[in-house]
Amino acid sequence: NAGVTQTPKFRVLKTGQSMTLLCAQDMNHEYMYWYRQDPGMGLRLIHYSVGEGTTAKGEVPDGYNVSRLKKQNFLLGLESAAPSQTSVYFCASSYRAVLTYEQYFGPGTRLTVT
Amino acid sequence: RKEVEQDPGPFNVPEGATVAFNCTYSNSASQSFFWYRQDCRKEPKLLMSVYSSGNEDGRFTAQLNRASQYISLLIRDSKLSDSATYLCVVNERYGGATNKLIFGTGTLLAVQP
């Protein structure tokens, strides 16, 4: 079991460029999440998905789009990158969104926008 | 006021010491509580859930005080391998049926030889 994987691990973008971050999980989890982590702030939820074909906005969705065409994959897109999107992005998944279920995180993608 | 607040540290302690972290949360309706551990430049991983009755896992003890809205983590006999950032996490209802994890900014622990 690979668990949750993310590609790429690192990326540098220029302002205005676009990119897609890929998250994949092999645990057959229903729920998937995208977070960003910035210094001095806790992880913040960008978007999440409760199942294949469904997505919803989290706490900080502006400037991002997501898609969940397959249960095991959750894509995060930046259409026009801005320096404020420089961050570490973590994908996570959980079996369900039931309160006591653990979220499993991927290794993260370090994105710098210049 | 932040939803989940932690002392950022760092806590520098010698091996073998006992160290305690506290965390406060603002939403009295919060329903589940966790401690996650995050090593430097790595992803967060669940350390333990926190139950109202308190729970222990080896050298780690977690306590919840709902009346005062705080959570604690006690680490006994600290090891060098305990050096990490400890994230206090609270689970709340969000968007109907979905639950959202609210993360604290973390407390950095550095165990010295």
Image (spheres, coloured by chain):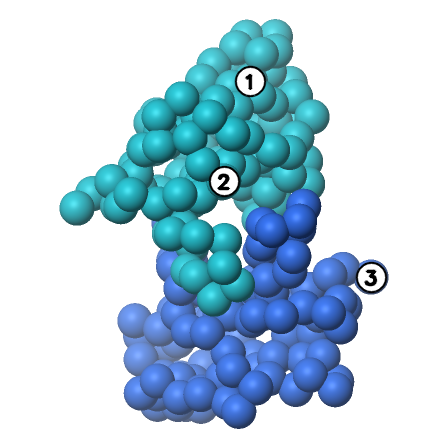
Chain colours: A cyan, B blue
Q: Which residue is mark 1?
A: A78
Of A37 and B77, nearer the camera is A37
Q: CA distance from mark 1 to mark 3?
A: 30 Å
Q: In the image, what residue occupies the spot 40% across and 22% down? A: A69
Relative to A46, does residue A83 appear above or below in the rendering?
A: above
Q: Residue furthest right?
A: B1
The residue tagged with tag 3: helix, strand or loop?
Answer: loop
The residue tagged with tag 2: helix, strand or loop?
Answer: strand
Q: Quadrant of the C terminus of chain B?
A: bottom left
User: Which amino acid type is marked by label 3?
Assistant: Arg
Q: How many other residues sit within 10 Å of disc 2, few (<14), some (14-19) or many (≥20)?
A: many
Residue B28 sits in quarter: bottom right
Q: How many other residues sit within 10 Å of disc 3, few (<14), some (14-19) or many (≥20)?
A: few
Relative to B87, does residue A14 appear above or below in the rendering?
A: above
Chain at tag 2: A
Q: Which residue is mark 2?
A: A50
Disc with the residue nearer the chain's start (1 vs 2): 2
Q: Which residue is mark 3?
A: B1
